[in-house]
């Protein structure tokens, strides 16, 4: 257990619905990262926060994806109007020193 | 652009034997960090080992060691005395950005290791 938690662990939704995932990092670290991992691939970076500031969002896959980190604590990743291609594992991670600890991920299935 | 290449989609090893998983990287930075992660079928990413580009010695963590050859731009993971529980996907990664300042990781495609009893 890395101390990074994600909720829910699994989400099944119908195409066109909105979904939101939550990540609670190890509280004393101030950077938080979101990744997406599709089947057979390594994780792909989406966005990151330093405290509450979102410092990189050009890698979010489309304008249907958005992320927030109110008050610099937990973060949420929202996907609007889901598509079947959004089915993937969504991982968050935080960055103490020379490690990057990942949460257990949220597995999204879009029917 | 930075890139991680893992050329072995799958590897088999006999239990108790050692195995080397290959990783080559491409970067123009002088300062960078290399990581290996294990991902079992349950999906969590488990940090194994880290090597900084200025570290003079190869990193070791228990049964894991990183064979760092800077001139060849390779960072191979060596697992000694393989165990059945080592069966998993293994990913090599490096920090992205100048000096890794942005902090996010870029990953290779992974190697699936299967340990045979």
Image: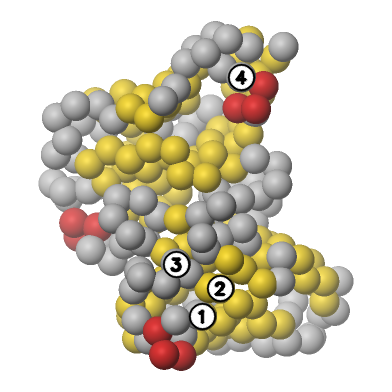
Q: Residue at x 40, y 55 (%)?
A: A100
Numbered badge on residue B83: 4
Q: CA distance from mark 1 to mark 3?
A: 12 Å
The answer to the question of whether label 1 and label 2 lie on touching residues, with beta carbons closer than 8 A, is: yes
Numbered badge on residue A5: none
Foreground of the two, A98 or B99: A98
Foreground of the two, B74 or A21: A21
Q: CA distance from mark 3 to mark 2?
A: 10 Å
**Location of residue A2 in the rendering, given as x and y in whole percent from the top left corner:** 51, 55
**Label 3 SS:** loop
**Location of residue B63 in the rendering, given as x and y in whole percent from the top left corner:** 44, 22
Q: Which residue is mark 3?
A: A26
Q: Residue at x 60, y 37 (%)?
A: B89
Q: Is residue B79 left or right of residue B56?
A: right
Q: Residue at x 66, y 49 (%)?
A: B43
Q: Is residue B109 above or below residue B78?
A: below
**Label 4 SS:** loop
Chain letter for mark 1, please. A
The answer to whether one can see residue A108 in this image is: no
Within 10 Å of disc 2 (Cα), the crowding (few <14, some 14-19, many 20+) is many
Q: Which residue is mark 2?
A: A23
Tell which circle, 1 or 2, labels the residue nearer the N-terminal end: 2
Within 10 Å of disc 4 (Cα), the crowding (few <14, some 14-19, many 20+) is some
Q: Which residue is mark 1?
A: A75
């Amino acid at each position: 257990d890395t101390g990074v938690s994600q909720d829910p662990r699994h989400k099944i939704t119908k195409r066109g619905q909105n979904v939101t995932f939550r990540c609670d990092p190890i509280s004393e670290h101030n950077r938080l990262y979101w990744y997406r991992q599709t089947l057979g691939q390594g994780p792909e970076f989406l966005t990151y926060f330093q405290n509450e500031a979102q410092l990189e969002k050009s890698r979010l896959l489309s304008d249907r994806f958005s992320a927030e980190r109110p008050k610099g604590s937990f973060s949420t990743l929202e996907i609007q109007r889901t598509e079947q291609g959004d089915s993937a594992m969504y991982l968050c991670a935080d960055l103490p020193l020379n490690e990057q600890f990942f949460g257990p991920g949220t597995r999204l299935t879009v029917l | 652009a930075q890139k991680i290449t893992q050329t072995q989609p799958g590897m088999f090893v006999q239990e108790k034997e050692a195995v080397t998983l290959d990783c080559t990287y491409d970067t123009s930075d002088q300062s960078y960090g290399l990581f290996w992660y294990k991902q079992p079928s349950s999906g969590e990413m488990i940090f194994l080992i880290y090597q900084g580009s200025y570290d003079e010695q190869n990193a070791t963590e228990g049964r894991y060691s990183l064979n760092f050859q800077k001139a060849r731009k390779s960072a191979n993971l060596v697992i000694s005395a393989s165990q059945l529980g080592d069966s998993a996907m293994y990913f090599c990664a490096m920090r992205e950005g100048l000096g890794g300042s942005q902090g996010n990781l870029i990953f290779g495609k992974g190697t699936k290791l299967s340990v045979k009893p």
